Amino acid sequence: MIIPIYQVDAFTDELFSGNPAAVCPVEYWPSDDILQNVASENNLSETVFLRRRYGLYEIRWFTPVSEVELCGHATLAAAHVLFNHLDFDRDHVKFESLYNGMLEVSKNMDYLTLDFPADNIEPALPPDHLFKALGCKPLEIWKGKTDYLLYYPSQEDIEELKPDFGLLKKIETRGIIVTAPGYDCDFVSRFFAPLLGINEDPVTGSAHTSLVPFWAHRLNQLEFEARQLSARGGFLKCKLSGDRVLISGKACTYMIGSITLT
């Protein structure tokens, strides 16, 4: 079996920044073990697999250790590959996901826009180990479908966090989002997911399905510019549209190759 592979840096217009994802189109679904082994071998925060079916694409996302329900940057990378390398001649593409229904990505000049369901977040109590793992107590704690969201007063608080990932891994959640007002944007964030084998994700599109409703309520606005303050960094434009979040960014191709499974 030979599987094409494209490595794409998402939520950036420069190589070696943003969040890298591997995009693997397949003609049929291999076994889950093969999909997971390929993702583990790639050793990126996300490998996305696509299968064309009846005019749309089935989509699945894998970290190095597990399959996940939703991934923003890998979906953006998948759309980038379709629009730029696989002769997809329309300006929007539909992805059918197992847990989040139909997802759409549209193209407008250099920007790709994800159309994702908005998360429903509620105030939450701190889970065990949280404060010790982060070393800095947040002002507020919220919980969405899969992640905790922690609000801090300043961008410096987010930049200076040095989590104990061993302790953070003991918290039963997909990830920990930390956020604060930004200096040159509306808000900044970081995302930690050691339970999924990703200590810190460079740029997390899906986290913005929680961040955008949170900041929409706090700032009384619907459109935002956001930065994720990882070492690689990333820039996103976001909009709350009813019960959907529109997440826009750029992407660039780093590598094209093939995987040979014998």
Image (cartoon, rainbow, N blue to C red):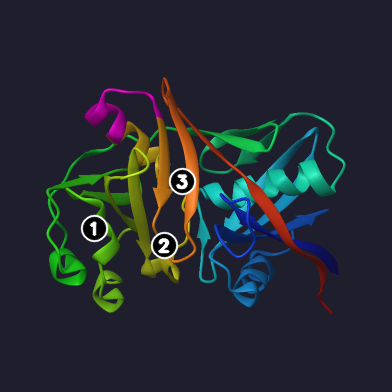
| Residue 230, disc | 2
Expressed as whole percent of the image width and height from the top left, the position of residue 212 reads 36, 35
For marks 1 and 2, give the one nearer the viewer: 1
Q: CA distance from mark 3 to mark 1?
A: 23 Å
Q: Quadrant of residue 175?
A: bottom left
Residue named by callout 3: 206
How many residues crowd mark 1 within 10 Å: few (<14), some (14–19), many (20+)? few
Q: Residue 46 has which mark? A: none
Q: Residue at x 25, y 66 (%)?
A: 161
> Dot 2 lies on which element?
loop
Using the image, determine if residue 16 lies above or below residue 223.
below
Q: Quadrant of the C terminus?
A: bottom right
- Three-letter code, disc 1: Glu
Give amino acid for label 3: Ser
Q: Which residue is mark 1?
A: 156
* Comparing labels 3 and 1, the label whose residue is closer to the camera: 1
Q: Is residue 125 above or below residue 88?
A: below
| Residue in the image at 44% along x and 66% along y | 231
Q: Is residue 182 left or right of residue 227?
A: left
For the residues bearing labels 2 and 3, Cβ distance under 8 angstroms = no
Between 81 and 71, the one nearer to me in the picture: 81
Q: Are marks 1 and 2 in contact (CB under 8 Å)?
A: no
Residue 101 lies in magenta, yes or no? no
Which residue is found at the position 70% from the left and 32% from the top? 109
Residue 214, percent across and down?
28, 35
Image height check: is 169 above or below 213?
below
Residues in magenta, as a range: 215-223
Query: Which circle's residue, 3 or 1, is located before the other in the chain?
Result: 1
Residue drawn at 54 percent across, 57 percent down: 18
Q: Classify residue 92 as left or right of residue 190.
A: right
